[in-house]
Amino acid sequence: MSKLEALTRWVDDVVRLTQPDRVHWCDGSEAEYDALVELMLASGDLVELNPRTHPNCHLHRSSPSDVARVEHLTFICTPNKDDAGPNNNWMDPAQAHAKIDALFAGCMQGRTLYVIPYCMGPIDSPLSRCGVEITDSPYVVANMRIMTRMGAPALARIEREGSRREGTFVKGLHSTGELDPHKRYIMHFPDELSIKSIGSGYGGNALLGKKCHALRIASWQARSEGWLAEHMLIVGIQNPQGEISYVAAAFPSACGKTNLAMLIPPESYRTAGWKVWTVGDDICWMTPGADGRLWAINPEAGFFGVAPGTSAKTNPNALAMLNHDAIFTNVAITADGDPWWEGLTEGTPVKDWQGRDYVAGNGPAAHPNSRFTVSARQCTSWSPHAEDAQGVPISAIVFGGRREHLVPLVFEARDWTHGVLVGASMGSETTAAATGAVGVLRRDSMAMKPFCGYNFADYFAHWLSFDKPGAKLPKIFHVNWFRKGEDGKFLWPGFGDNMRVLEWILGRCNGSEGAAETPIGNLPRAQDLNTDGLDLTRGKLEALLHVDADSWIAEYESIGEYLASYGTRTPEVLQREQQRIAAALTEEQMEPQEVGTP
C-alpha cells in the first residue's frame, strides 16, 4: 500500500465535492511558478511592475471586501466547547463540516484544483511539520511557494514519514468561492489536523500554512507533543567577540515586531562589532533539546509583511529586499509602475490600491493592510542558521506591548512562572488606527489571542509545564518602546536604538548584576543602559524606568480579573503568582533594591 494513499484518497474526495475542471499537483519548480504568473497576468489577477527597478515583481489587487483576516468568522471546532475556550469562536465539528461543505459543493467548476504539498520549517528538520493545501487560487500557490518549502521535497518528506506518522500531515482545503463576505468561513479541526477556508483570497485566510497551520493547528499539536508554537520573531544578536545569542519576541500588532527582527544597530554598535541576524519575523516553534534548552525554528520561508510604514527610516533591511522577486498586494503604483505606500518618501502614487486614479485627500493610496510577499533569503540580515535542522538555542524570550504610561522600558521576570504571568497578562492600548475608543487596554496573551488553537487556560498550563528538573529555560523579559512623557511625546527613540535594551537583556542572561529588584521584576538602573550618543536626559531615562506603585496595584487587580475570566481551568500557580505580586506591591511600596545587595 502506498504511503501516500491517505493523501490521494483525500484529494479524490475533494475533487468529487468541488468538481474542478482540472487537477494539478504542484512541484514547486521555477517553471511552474513562471507559468502561474503568466496565467495571472493574462487574467488580470496580476499586474507587472517596473521591470527595470523591480524585476520579477507583481501587484495583486484583491476584492475591496477581502483585505484582512476575519476573526469573527474564524472558528475552532472541537467536540468539547471548553477545549476551544473563551478566547476562540467555537462550532461543533459536525455542524461546521456540514455548513462549510455545502459552500464547497461544486465551487471549483470551471477552475483548476491545485494540490500544494508543503513543509513548515527546514525540509530535513525534526522540528518541522508538513501539510497539504488544496486551493483553486493560483495567487495562493504563488505565495505558498515563497512562504513555505513547497512541492516535490515536501511530498517526498510526507511519503518518508508515512510509515511512522501516517496521517499526521495537516490537510487544508481552500477556495475563493464567490468572495462573498456572507459565505466566508475559516474552520479549524484540531483533532483532525485539518483546516477548511472559503470565500477569501486574503493571505491570512487563504495561505493556510501561515496562521491557520503554523499557529492554530500547530499550537494544538505542540501541546500534545511537548513543544511550543508561538507568534514570535527570532533574532540573533552577535557581540564583538563573535558570539551569537538568540532572542524570541512576541508583540501584538503595531508594536514593531518586523522592525525588531531586522534591526540595524546604531553606528557605534556596528563599529564595535555588533551584528543582528534575522531568523524569522512572525512565527517561532520551540522544542526542548537534550541539553535542556529551548531550540527554535522559523517554520516559514518568507515574509508576508505589512507595506505601509516600511521605509528607509523604520526598516531599511525590509525595504532593500523588495526590489526584485516579490509579490505586492493592494499597494499603490507610481507613473513609472513602481509600488508605493504611505511611509515612502520617494515617488508619487498615480493609481490607488483599487486601480483607481489617485486623488490626494480621498483616503490612503495603499490599503493600510497592504502586503508584500518575499523570500526570507532576500533579507540582508537573513541568518544562514535559519536553515539549521536542529534550530537555534533561545537565550531570552521578550514580551511587549504599547503602553503610554504604566510599563517601564524593560524589566526581567524573576523566574519562569513569573514570566508566564507577564506573557499571559501583556496587552496594548488601542491607537487611532483601530476602530473604537483610543487608549483602551486590550490584553493579548503572548500575542496569541487570534491564533491560539485551544483554551488559553490550558495554554498557560502548557507553558508552565516546561519548568521541570534539568530544564535550562530562557529568561523572560517585557519591553515597552511606547512610553510617553508629560508632553505626550515618546521618551525612547526606538528603532535601531532598541539594540541598547537588547544588550542589557543579554547581559542579564549572561549573569550581569546590573539591575534593581522590584515586585514587578528586575529593572535596569539608569547607569545600566548604554545611552552614549543618545539625546536622552537623565530625567527622561528615569521616567522610562519609573514604576508607579498605585498604578501597578490597579494593574494587578485587572490581571487577576483577566485570569479569573478563564474559569476553573486557569492554573492555580499562575493565580498565586498574581496574588504574590499584588501583595508585594502593597507591602513594599515599590522601594527598589539592587539585585545581589544586602
Image (spheres, rainbow, N blue to C red):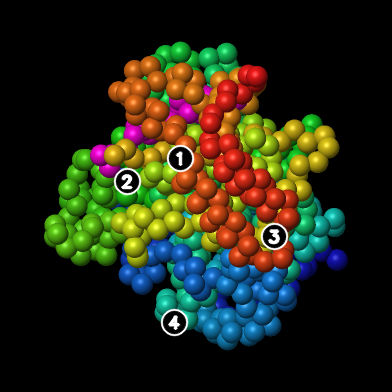
Q: Position of residue 333 (x, y in %)?
A: 24, 53
Q: CA distance from mark 3 to mark 2?
A: 38 Å
Location of the N terminus by quadrant is bottom right
Q: Give the overall secondary structure of the magenta segment.
A: helix
Q: Which of the marked residues, 1 or 2, is nearer the chain's N terminus?
A: 2
Q: Secondary structure at mark 1?
A: loop
- The three-letter amino acid code for the residue at tag 1 is Asp
Q: Quadrant of residue 325?
A: top left
- Asked if the stretch drawn in magenta spans residue 20, the answer is no
Left or right relative to 181: residue 490: left
User: Where residue 32 appears, x then y in whole percent?
Assistant: 51, 56
Mark 4 and mark 1: span between their CA atoms?
Answer: 48 Å
Q: Which residue is mark 4?
A: 182
Q: Are the residues tagged 3 and 4 within 8 Å (C-beta)?
A: no
Front one among 490 and 65: 490
Mark 3: amino acid: Thr
In front of the other: label 3 or label 4? 3
Give, as a single range, the part of the protein colored magenta: 487-508
The residue beneath circle 2 is 309
Instruction: Please rate how many residues cluster around mark 4, counting C-alpha atoms within 10 Å: few if below 14, some from 14 to 19, many from 20.
Output: few
